[in-house]
């Protein structure tokens, strides 16, 4: 894992570990280590998939530009999964859980994890491949209280398709069977994290992106990916949970140990010359940032269709994706009077009420038209634009006692807390500066004011100690209130202002 991290930081090549300690199987990582390499992996199919998405947005494009879209029907054909009746490559051999590469990414991880799993489930009573769900839900292979070789942990979060299936199985008498694919065509791993509408199988997208139909077969009642390097089959025990984690996660800290479902292992298949695919997550950017980069490219044409009025969104990778969502929306409700946030508030509620964007912690939305240069991918400029215009008395909107992302520990409980929307529209209200108010004196325990950029000030604060620290915040607010903060609309209290202000990535 540490070798992977160092090579990734150096923008190095993909890594093949030929002799993994304790396992007969080699392992590969950093396949998606750069945006350029990830695009190259799909260079034969990426444009074709984009064109299919464009036709979904506006089917009349096919009539207007037939030469651009002539190949789209053939691309769509590759979306149809293909059953293979005999001789599945993945059933070349069988192994056991303990023979798989036991990769522990961080010192305090609860055990070894599968970090690029493709977990496939079907609803009760169904063998219809188009009803399947394929998701990337981390799998704990060892450690904690799992019975070695027989039990593995299944961790999934809010708003995941497997949760829908799990609910259906809890209400039925059928066993909840699942198959975990590892490796195979890179398109299959990418499909497992693609945010598709509920009811649309990720296997269709996997076929289009791979350029050939997803091949599958059946082993008794278990679905197998013919082209995977490994397939683990098993049954998720209904009503049974065990402690899963901790795990050094993509937000840059450990997600703690919690009770999650347990899967009883049935078989572990592998293909000839199988290679174990893995990655290492941590504070962004990491290898999985390439997935987010490609997702943004592919779903951008769908934004206006899925969220009417919204022109652009960016789930910020440097912030861990879900914690920060930037958006630009249309403001057209009352064009006959002074502009203020109205339509963009409706759009904000839509974003927080649908799909993966509903997991956002901070949603910052600005109205289009106030600055033609505004875009969500120039993040320092976007913040500058918002802070020049925001009216904190009007533009700050909280959603309290709501569901929040599973990895968010800032709330009142697990999956419970608050979100905030900052919505701005209209002319500039202030000029941003990097000058402290004259004669500023910070209260005891607060020190080292540093500017992140004009208008954003970081101040080092006493360590947070729970509710008793609220008094520190009130004390700070009372002490600085008399000063003129016209040109500094955002103050961030932090444990290390020098680190936070060192670069914008640290701030995010």
Image: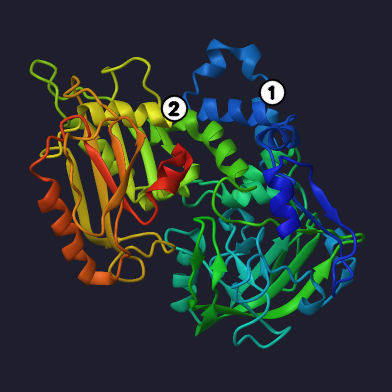
Quarter of the image containing the C terminus?
top left
Instruction: Kindly give the residue lying farthest to the front in the view shown.
Output: 439
Q: Quadrant of residue 458?
A: top left
Question: Crowding at label 2, few (<14), some or many (≥20) Cα neighbours within 10 Å?
Answer: few
- Please name whichever residue, 396 or 428, is drawn nearer the observer in this view of the structure: 428
Q: Residue at x 57, y 50 (%)?
A: 193
Q: Is residue 187 left or right of residue 491?
A: right
Instruction: Report the side of 218 relative to 133 (left or right).
Output: right
Q: Nearer the viewer, residue 280 or 261?
A: 280
Q: Nearer the viewer, residue 70 or 361?
A: 361
Task: List the residue tagged with mark 2.
Answer: 378
Is 374 drawn above or below residue 353 in the view shown? above
Sequence order check, earlier mark of 2 and 1? 1
Whole-number angstrom distance, CA of label 2 to CA of label 1: 34 Å
Q: Quadrant of the N terminus?
A: bottom right
Please indicate, yes or no, whether residue 311 appears anywhere in the rendered image. no
Residue to which mark 1 is pinned: 71
């Amino acid at each position: 894992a540490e070798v992977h991290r160092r090579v990734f930081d150096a923008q190095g090549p993909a890594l093949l570990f030929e002799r993994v300690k304790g396992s007969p199987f080699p392992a590969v990582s950093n396949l998606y280590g750069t945006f350029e390499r990830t695009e190259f992996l799909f260079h034969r199919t990426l444009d074709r998939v984009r064109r299919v998405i464009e036709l979904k947005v506006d089917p009349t494009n096919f009539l207007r530009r037939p030469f651009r879209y002539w190949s789209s029907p053939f691309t769509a054909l590759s979306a149809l999964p293909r059953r293979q009746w005999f001789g599945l490559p993945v059933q070349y051999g069988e192994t056991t859980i303990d023979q798989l590469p036991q990769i522990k990414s961080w010192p305090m991880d609860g055990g070894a994890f599968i970090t690029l799993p493709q977990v496939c489930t079907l609803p009760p009573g169904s063998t219809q491949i188009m009803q399947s769900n394929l998701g990337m839900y981390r799998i704990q292979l060892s450690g904690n209280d799992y019975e070695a070789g027989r039990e593995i942990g299944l961790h999934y979060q809010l708003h995941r398709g497997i949760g829908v299936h799990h609910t259906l199985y809890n209400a039925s008498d059928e066993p909840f069977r699942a198959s975990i694919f590892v490796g195979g065509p890179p398109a299959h791993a990418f499909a497992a994290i693609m945010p598709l509408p509920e009811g649309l199988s990720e296997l269709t997208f996997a076929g289009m992106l791979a350029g050939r139909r997803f091949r599958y077969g059946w082993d008794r009642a278990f679905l197998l990916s013919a082209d995977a390097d490994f397939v683990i089959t098993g049954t998720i025990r209904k009503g049974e949970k065990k402690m899963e984690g901790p795990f050094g996660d993509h937000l840059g800290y450990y997600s703690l140990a919690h009770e999650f479902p347990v899967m009883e292992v049935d078989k572990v298949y592998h293909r000839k010359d199988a290679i174990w695919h893995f990655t290492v997550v941590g504070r962004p950017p990491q290898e999985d940032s390439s997935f987010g980069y490609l997702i943004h490219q592919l779903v951008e044409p769908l934004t206006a269709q899925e969220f009417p009025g919204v022109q652009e969104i960016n789930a910020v990778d440097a912030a861990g994706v879900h914690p920060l969502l930037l958006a630009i929306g249309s403001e057209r409700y009352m064009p006959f009077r002074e502009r203020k946030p109205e339509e963009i508030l409706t759009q904000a509620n839509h974003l927080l009420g649908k799909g993966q964007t509903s997991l956002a912690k901070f949603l910052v939305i600005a109205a289009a038209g106030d600055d033609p240069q505004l875009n969500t991918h120039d993040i320092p400029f976007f913040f500058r634009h918002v802070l020049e215009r925001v009216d904190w008395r009007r533009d700050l909107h909280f959603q309290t006692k709501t569901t929040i992302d599973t990895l968010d520990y800032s709330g009142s409980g697990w999956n419970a807390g608050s979100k905030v929307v900052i919505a701005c529209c209209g002319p500039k209200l202030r000029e941003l500066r990097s000058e402290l108010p004259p004669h500023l004196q910070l209260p005891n325990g607060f020190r080292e004011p540093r500017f992140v950029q004009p208008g954003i000030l970081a101040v080092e604060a006493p360590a947070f100690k729970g509710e008793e620290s609220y008094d520190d915040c009130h004390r700070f607010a009372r002490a600085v209130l008399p000063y003129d903060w016209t040109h500094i609309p955002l103050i961030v209290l932090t444990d290390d202002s020098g680190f936070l202000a060192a670069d914008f990535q640290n701030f995010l």
